[in-house]
Image (spheres, rainbow, N blue to C red):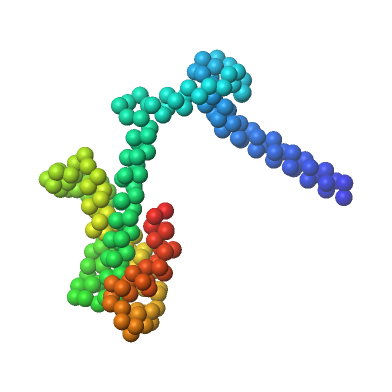
């Protein structure tokens, strides 16, 4: 029993030391944030001699024209509308493919899936030429426009498969209760699409 306890203690001790050794670069980097450049390159101490916030101030101001606050605002102004437009357009396109039988449904869906095989290097030049003609260069429209018209085939494909797993009885019940196709989508199917939509966002 004593040998087993000793083995367990030694195992945990070894794992603890090994963990500290593995984490040492991260710990050193964290404390280096509060050191001056002279102290970083001229001393081997882990803890700083004097805690300085100068690195954070300089990092926030950056060396360019804009501060980090501008970059944050720019990111949110780009990401939030693009994400919302992608979710709205891709879910509507997927609803059309999954629930309606219209002429050319299978053919159009096949073309949509085929675009997944195109590498980005093939599309980037025609896309640039198109955006240039439309005068959208250096604007958010180059992100908003594709997101608004469901130009992300993987998301559409994933939502179509998810919708095909939902029973059509739900749609029929909604139609009997007086819902139209759009109301059925918004009130019945969209809440059930939450897992797939959250996967798209991620």
Q: Quadrant of residue 45?
A: top right
What residue lies at 52% left-to-right and 26% top-to-bottom? 33
What residue lies at 67% left-to-right and 36% top-to-bottom? 18
Kindly give the residue lying farthest to the left in the view shown. Answer: 133
Question: Where does residue 61 sit, x and y in percent of width and height?
Answer: 38, 26
Question: Where does residue 110 sit, x and y in percent of width and height?
Answer: 25, 67
What residue lies at 60% left-to-right and 18% top-to-bottom? 49
Kindly give the residue lying farthest to the front in the view shown. Answer: 178
Question: In the visual, does 59 lie left or right of 180?
Answer: right
**Which residue is more in the foreground, 114 or 89?**
89
Residue 161 shows up from this direction: no
Question: In the visual, does 47 lie left or right of 159?
Answer: right
Kindly give the residue lying farthest to the right in the view shown. Answer: 2
Residue 78 shows up from this direction: yes
Question: Total of numbered circles in the picture?
Answer: 0
User: From the viewer's perspective, is residue 145 above or below residue 29?
Assistant: below
What residue lies at 83% left-to-right and 43% top-to-bottom? 6
Question: In the visual, does 13 lie left or right of 84?
Answer: right
**Which residue is more in the foreground, 179 or 15?**
179
User: From the viewer's perspective, is residue 189 above or below residue 144?
Assistant: below
Question: Where does residue 172 sit, x and y in percent of width and height?
Answer: 34, 82
User: From the viewer's perspective, is residue 17 above or below residue 141?
Assistant: above
Kindly give the residue lying farthest to the bottom in the view shown. Answer: 176
**Which residue is more in the foreground, 168 or 73?**
73
Question: Where does residue 32 sit, x and y in percent of width and height?
Answer: 54, 25
Q: Quadrant of residue 106?
A: bottom left
Question: In the visual, does 150 lie left or right of 5?
Answer: left
């Amino acid at each position: 029993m004593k040998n087993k306890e000793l083995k367990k203690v030694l195992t945990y001790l070894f794992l603890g030391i090994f963990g500290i050794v593995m984490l040492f670069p991260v710990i050193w980097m964290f404390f280096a944030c509060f050191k001056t450049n002279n102290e970083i390159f001229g001393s081997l101490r882990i803890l700083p001699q004097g805690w300085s916030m100068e690195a954070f101030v300089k990092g926030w101001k950056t060396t360019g024209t804009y501060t980090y606050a501008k970059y944050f605002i720019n990111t949110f102004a780009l990401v939030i509308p693009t994400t919302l437009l992608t979710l709205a357009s891709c879910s509507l396109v997927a609803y059309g493919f999954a629930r309606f039988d219209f002429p050319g449904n299978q053919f159009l869906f096949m073309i949509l899936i085929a675009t997944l095989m195109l590498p980005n290097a093939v599309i980037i030049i025609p896309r640039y030429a198109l955006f240039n003609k439309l005068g959208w260069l250096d604007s958010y429209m180059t992100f908003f426009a594709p997101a608004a018209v469901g130009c992300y085939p993987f998301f559409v494909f994933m939502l179509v498969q998810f919708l095909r797993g939902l029973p059509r009885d739900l749609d029929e019940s909604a139609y009997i209760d007086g819902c139209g196709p759009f109301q059925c989508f918004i009130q019945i199917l969209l809440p059930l699409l939450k897992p797939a939509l959250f996967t798209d966002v991620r």
